[in-house]
């Protein structure tokens, strides 16, 4: 009779002998689940990924699809440690969502080293498919360039030709300020000043006073999540809008508008890649998400659904989990789902799709719960995003 020790050793040997391709597909959601971006992405993105897996059928290549999640707390070193363990020990095949640009850039580099696929949804910097692009890295939903073209271009053309920026003091804020400044200048406007604001600030008073004294027509909020909602609330206390200046929420989603309420958010102009009430497909996703969560999805949640679904479609089409084969299929397959219709993935990993310029409704204009936006313009994908050649991605040279 074999000893328990020998039996355990034999079982371990059998497990080790199972090829990676037979271990199923494992997807990781790595994002902020407890901090300033918890509502923006957080557990709601996890639910969106679960929806995609369920809609796909729960398995691919005859193997079960598994989802793991972790909170990176907006710390690149913590995120890298988690991702390294996922890749090296837990056989995670793809990481997605990746809120916070500094985190996304770090994981992008690690994924390149490990030859693993990442699909960034929550982070904004256009560098991900620009100078920091890599063969296994993808960027879904939006980026700083698309936000700049949508909100920055529209407000400047409408007469908002002087800008002052409140900029989040890390990679995302810098990229959003840079991309928007270029669009403002291209449309005949000018930037009269900017101030760097630490992530997760509670007091915006000194920064808002600088914006107020600049006399700029537009105060550009190059921040996101709770930082955006807090800066808008405090701007009201200083009478910035009643004094004649206009606030531009350069990265605002439905989650932040909901947090603010229509009374405070009315009149804000913003750009998103998705809104639940745009068409039958977006409504289908929105209503199914609402049944699970009691809230409508934002661009980040819907984008996570699309990124997860697109990855699984690419695995199926490739007939393997091999990252090179899957990356090739991701760039070949069109993106047609409840998030985007007619989307395409460029050589640099950028998923190109239409973006939408919205104005937040007045409370009197809203006819039902979550009826928050009126559509001002559709920005075609090829106008919103850099081309692969324009992006500066080394892969396209």
Image (cartoon, rainbow, N blue to C red):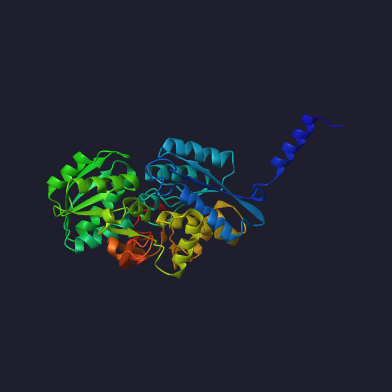
Residue 328 appears in the figure: no
Seen as rendered, the residue at the extreme bottom is 280
Q: Position of residue 231 (x, y in %)?
A: 26, 46
Viewer-side residue, 19 vs 67 = 67
Residue 354 appears in the figure: yes
Q: Position of residue 310 (x, y in %)?
A: 51, 59
| Residue at point 45%, 36% (across, down) | 78
Q: How many marks?
A: 0
Seen as rendered, the residue at the extreme right is 1
Picture quarter with the C terminus: bottom left
| Residue at point 43%, 35% (across, down) | 77
Viewer-side residue, 317 vs 276 = 276
Residue 218 in the figure: left or right of residue 85: left
Picture quarter with the N terminus: top right
Residue 204 in the figure: left or right of residue 311: left
Q: Position of residue 156 (x, y in %)?
A: 20, 60
Q: Position of residue 89 (x, y in %)?
A: 59, 38
Viewer-side residue, 195 vs 139 = 195
| Residue at point 42%, 69% (across, down) | 279
Viewer-side residue, 194 vs 43 = 43
């Amino acid at each position: 009779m074999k000893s328990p020790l020998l039996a355990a050793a034999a079982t371990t040997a059998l497990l080790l002998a199972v090829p990676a391709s037979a271990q199923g597909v494992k997807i990781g959601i790595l994002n902020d689940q407890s901090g300033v971006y918890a509502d923006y992405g957080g557990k709601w993105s996890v639910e969106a990924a679960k929806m995609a897996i369920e809609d796909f059928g729960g398995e691919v290549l005859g193997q079960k699809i598994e989802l793991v999640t972790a909170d990176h707390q907006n710390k690149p070193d913590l995120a890298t440690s988690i991702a390294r363990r996922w890749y090296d020990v837990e056989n995670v095949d793809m990481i997605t969502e990746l809120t916070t640009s500094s985190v996304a850039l770090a994981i992008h580099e690690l994924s390149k080293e490990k030859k693993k696929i990442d699909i960034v949804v929550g982070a904004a910097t256009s560098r991900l498919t620009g100078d920091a692009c890599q063969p296994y890295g993808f960027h879904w939903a939006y980026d700083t360039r698309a936000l700049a073209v949508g909100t920055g271009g529209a407000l400047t053309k409408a007469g908002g030709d002087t800008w002052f920026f409140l900029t989040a003091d890390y990679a995302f804020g810098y990229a959003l300020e840079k991309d928007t400044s270029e669009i403002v200048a291209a449309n005949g406007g000018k930037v009269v000043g900017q101030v760097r604001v630490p992530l997760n600030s509670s007091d915006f008073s000194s920064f808002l006073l600088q914006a107020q004294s600049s006399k700029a027509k537009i105060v550009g909020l190059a921040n996101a999540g709770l930082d955006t909602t807090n800066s808008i609330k405090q701007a009201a206390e200083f009478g910035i809008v009643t004094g004649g200046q206009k606030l531009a929420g350069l990265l605002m989603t439905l989650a932040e508008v909901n947090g603010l309420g229509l009374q405070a958010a009315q009149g804000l102009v913003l750009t998103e890649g998705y809104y639940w009430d745009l068409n039958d497909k977006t409504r289908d996703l929105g209503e199914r998400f609402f049944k699970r969560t009691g809230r409508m999805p934002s661009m980040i949640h819907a984008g996570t659904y699309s990124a997860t679904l697109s990855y699984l479609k690419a695995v199926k089409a490739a007939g393997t989990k091999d990252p090179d084969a899957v990356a090739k299929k991701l760039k070949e397959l069109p993106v047609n789902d409840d998030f985007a219709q007619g989307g395409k993935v460029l050589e640099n990993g950028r998923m190109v799709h239409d973006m939408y310029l919205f104005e937040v409704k007045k409370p009197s204009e809203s006819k039902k719960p979550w009826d928050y936006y009126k559509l001002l313009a559709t920005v075609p994908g090829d106008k919103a995003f850099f081309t692969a050649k324009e992006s500066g991605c080394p892969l396209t040279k």
